[in-house]
Image (tube, helix red, strand yellow):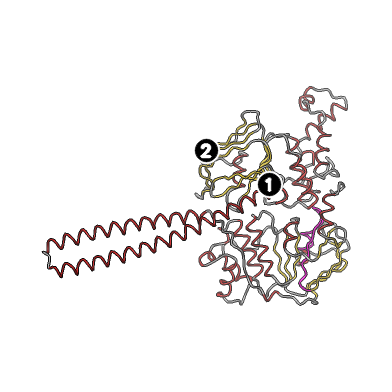
Amino acid sequence: MATPTAPSASLTCSALSFQWQDGTPVLDGLSLAIGRGRTGLVGTNGTGKSTLLRLLAGQLAPSQGSVTVGGSLAYLPQNITLDTALRVDQALGIAERRAALRAIENGDVSEEHFDTVGDDWDVEERALATLGSLGLADVELDRTVGQLSGGETTLLRLAALLLERPDVLLLDEPTNNLDVFARRRLYEAVDSWRSGVLLVVSHDRELLERVDRIAELRSGSVNWYGGGWSAYEEALATQQEAAGRMLRAAEADVRRQKRELEETQIKVARRARHSKKMDAQRKAPRIVAGEKKRSAQESGDKLRGLHEDRLSDAHERREEAAEAIRNDAEIRVSLPHTAVPTGRTVLSIDELSLPHGKLRDGSLHIHGPERIALVGRNGAGKTTLLRTLTGELEPLCGQAKTFVPLRFLPQRLDVLDEELSVAANVARMAPGVADNHIRSQLARFLFKGARAEQPAGTLSGGERFRATLAATMLAAPAPQLLMLDEPTNSLDMASVRQLTSALESYEGALLIASHDLPFLESIGITRWLLLGEDLQETTAEEVRDLLEAPEAG
């Protein structure tokens, strides 16, 4: 378990190993030392980043090895749940000090109140200032957590950690569910971090640009890269170019060694035939002929063995070179039945009011294969709007009507049956579609052969996302309106690229609620909608301008 030691801010782990109760290994002998400054921890889904943070925070006990924390530690997990009945000051951990201050102000000079306050006489002012710095200036300390949105809850928990003034701060996917305005506040908090060790697990490229160094967890070890995300990508590209050259050279060496081995075998065989022919012509004694034959065989075997060893070494070098090549395969799927004619009405919303959120008079009409980004503040009701459009929720008033087959990819990816295989899950959503067609399409979603038979419950995060995406996009009838709710949350960069390539093949209309501006800009958005009390047309540039404006949030 993590144990506080020296006051100097530091974080180390030595020979750290961990496996789950079913024996599944996650880390094996990892040693790591993290000093002051901002470090971004990256890696593909399933490499163990969140598990490592939980080990560092002392929430999990390692199978072997140790964790040492220099100073105090605070940890923001990926999934945050707070009691909705809590007051904000209770969630911030300052309720008792506030109560003691009030008692002293009212004339109660009991020693216990002074002990509770300690030296923290400005705790309320610090709390309000911290909330304000994170865009929560309107959140009163006596409000309840249940009145806050998911994004506001995340920022509230971060505010509680910052109030502790920790020497070591661990953040796991902190921008998940944050709107573009709240993300800016988080970016500013990271920019201003100066007090100790900040370790952040994230797939948010803009957040990762703000760190001092990148630590990549890959194949059970950590590689370090100086600078932010762009510097990391540049260094990675250089490495991959060099790895590609090494692989090509290794493959050429394998071909050359194969050729030399074949030539050697031919020479040895010719020599044996020639020796046998000459012995027959000379009528050499049998004992002499036998000795010469054994000698020739030994010589030939030695020569063959030499070339076989060289070929084996060449194969090993090729395998080593191939391991250095990153294989982030892309999804390449054909979805012609999703096409929508340009003039066709896909969705119509008239004077719609939502049961939750701000929308009170929303109207929207989608025609043809438009690609619409839905952005807005946390609590505006983006998810509520999408679920209303699917028919899961009833509007307060107004109406929404779809005119084409619709499919919805929710944030939680909870549409799969855990007991069924990937192929069976897709077949369940595509009744009447031939099994051969489903399997050929699944191969394009990188589920080839036996991988399509994996039960959904055994899939990694990235695999689960691809399986859910396949089940959604391959459904029958083919979806001509596809709605996605924060699809890039917790996805590694390879999975984001796979999503992007899949959407390039989609020919229908898209309605995507997302806070990931780089992703939205990469998929050809044709209209931007800002959700508030109504649906306002905007642009990517205007959204970015709002982020940069001092009054934003």
* Circle 2/circle 1 CB separation < 8 Å: no
Magenta stretch bounds: 368-386
What percent of the width, then of the height, locates residue 548?
83, 49
Spot the residue most to the left. 285
Q: Give, as a three-letter code, the residue at label 1.
A: Gly
Q: Give, as a three-letter code, the residue at label 2.
A: Gly
Foreground residue among 287 and 179: 287
Total label count?
2
What percent of the width, then of the height, locates residue 290?
16, 62
Eyeballing the image, is 330 above or below 337? above
What percent of the width, then of the height, locates residue 506?
69, 70
- In the rendered structure, the answer to whether residue 551 lies left or right of residue 427 reads right
Q: CA–CA distance between discs 2 and 1?
A: 30 Å
Eyeballing the image, is 545 above or below 396? above
Secondary element at image label 1: loop
Looking at the rendered image, the disc whose residue lies closer to the viewer, 2 or 1, is 1
- Give the quarter of the image for residue 145: top right
Foreground residue among 239 and 177: 239
Q: Write down the residue under mark 2.
A: 65
Quadrant showing the N terminus? top right
Q: Is residue 379 magenta?
A: yes
What percent of the width, then of the height, locates residue 105?
87, 27
- In the rendered structure, the answer to whether residue 107 lies left or right of residue 405 reads right
Q: Which residue is located at x 52 percent, y 38 percent?
A: 65
Q: Write down the residue under mark 1.
A: 228
Task: Identify the mark nearer the N-term, 2 or 1.
Answer: 2
- Give the quarter of the image for residue 307: bottom left
Categorize mark 1 by other alpha carbons within 10 Å: few (<14), some (14-19), many (20+). Answer: many
- In the rendered structure, the answer to whether residue 519 lies left or right of residue 546 reads left
Secondary element at image label 2: strand
Categorize mark 2 by other alpha carbons within 10 Å: few (<14), some (14-19), many (20+). Answer: some
- Give the quarter of the image for residue 270: bottom left
